[in-house]
Image (cartoon, grey):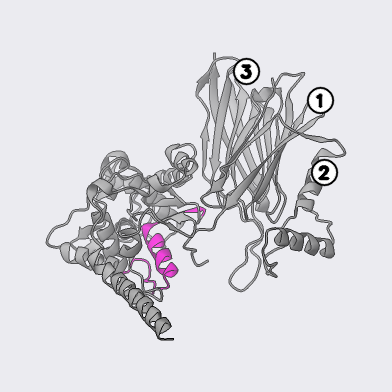
Amino acid sequence: MQRHASRREFLRAAGGAAAGLGLVSLVSVRPARATPEAMQEAIRKVVGPARVTPGRVKLELPPLVENGNVVPLAVSVESPMTEADHVRAIHVFTERNPLPDVLGVRLGPRAGRARVATRIRLAHTQTVVAIGELSDGSFWSDSAAVVVTLAACLEEA
Amino acid sequence: MARALVNVPARARRGEIIEIKTLISHVMETGHRRTQDGATIPRDIIRLFVCTYNGAEVFRAELHPAIAANPFLVFSTVATESGTLALHWTGDNGFSVTESAAIVVE
Amino acid sequence: MALLDGAIRRVVRRLGAAVVALLLGSSVFAAEIPRSQRRSGYEFMSRETRAMQDDDTANPGLLWVLEGEALWGRKIGAAGRACADCHGDARAGMKGVAARHPAFDAARGRPVSLEQRIRSCRTDRQQAPPLAWESRDLLALSAYVARQSRGLPIEPAIDDRSRPFLESGRAAFHRRQGQLNLACSQCHDDNWGRRLAGNVVPQAHPTGYPIYRLEWQNLGSLQRRLRNCLVGTRAEVPDYGAPELVDLELYLMWRARGMTLEAPAVRP
């Protein structure tokens, strides 16, 4: 996974995000976090120059997760799933995990239904984006905001 | 030894859309965690899952570290003919597991 | 000035009274949860986590049950014996066992936990190297055995021999300890249902062990969970298998008597 954002851009983005949330920006030894820019770049890599239109994709996530380590996620795309008109791929991205890519799924008319479910990790409260690629080359998307709280009693490593 | 739980209906009608649920034990080490002394624990994840139906690929998923430990995947396929569904997981450190499930399609 | 002094004194007195009430609280209010109000941790979980537990094709704990099933039939050790050779089919032979443990062990003169029982069998009967605490194989076997009690009521046998250990566990549950000077009962008897940093405080009934805990992303035993809590309250943490932990396990199972075993459960 390449992240081309320069150090200055990263800090500016991180500071801006933190200021926007009304938080003091912290210097931490945690690994660099993906930014909304990094997510956009990861999306570009998959989508290319094509436009992504919100709609037709449904991203299901609980609005408040019990534990960010295991978050149930499902993505479905409206489609007849015929040879002529089907979903070719579904991609999932996050805004604030260490890396923006989550899952990339290849489908086809043999899938019958464009729906995939899994469980993901979410490091922070953030927005998750799902993109559906159709057989006609068009891209559609849905996004969901998720609140992630930490467990009350954290275990020793 | 990695254990996998695969749920495929034993029988289906021709043309029916069947749901396949898979669960495999794997730590999915992200590569971001550190030990007490600060050393990074290297990444160790399943990277690819492929399902074939009598040899033809019907589903493929690329997994990244954001997929939770003991990866759970649910997808569907059209029951076209009787035969075997082969499920294949591959990943870091030579991880490779294949499970098969037979299906009778009438 | 005098007015302010008076006001401050009143506040201090009121605060003092509150502090005294809190101090007394741990002994006066820590009554057992009435049976009709007893609720499993399951009921405090989100819909999604409950769905994860309910579906045997989606519950990660079942991966360990599968492994346990394989281990059950495997001959090992100098004795070349499998669990199945003595105990037969686990579905019949192990039915109710997890629901009755910790159980009194005459040879040791004290109750032992399910994990301790499995470890003893491994060394004494199978004459194989011991299973490490929280090792994959020990968890797999305990998950497999516990699964055979799923749906049964928790019913540890208490008699004159095990009663002293039950009392020791009860005392531990109600004893303030650690830097936070907290007793288990203060959260789990007096404040269950309330929130602690975004999570709901459960009643702490061991209805689902060994559990797949989302926080661990792994299966784990009741003793692991107890040790976590002790770390969380900044108390001293006994080693796995320590008598204090087994006594506490016994008390918790007794406190949960009549409730249904859900093993292997999923918990946040």
Query: Which-is-in-front pick, marks 3 and 2?
Result: 2
Disc assigned to residue A44 = 2
Disc number lying in front (1 or 3): 1
Q: Chain of mark 1?
A: A
The CA span between labels 3 and 2 is: 36 Å
Q: Position of residue B29 (x, y in %)?
A: 61, 56
SS label for mark 3: loop
Callout 2 amino acid: Arg
Tell me the residue that label 3 is attached to: B80
Residue C17 drawn at (x, y percent): 30, 74
Q: Position of C136 compared to B90: left or right?
A: left
Q: Amino acid at mark 1?
A: Asp
> In this orientation, which residue lies closer to the viewer: A157 or A154?
A154
Seen in the image, is C228 located left or right of residue B50? left
Magenta stretch containing residue C28, yes or no?
no
Which label was assigned to residue B83? Answer: none
Residue bearing the label numbered 1: A136
Q: Magenta residues?
A: C217-242
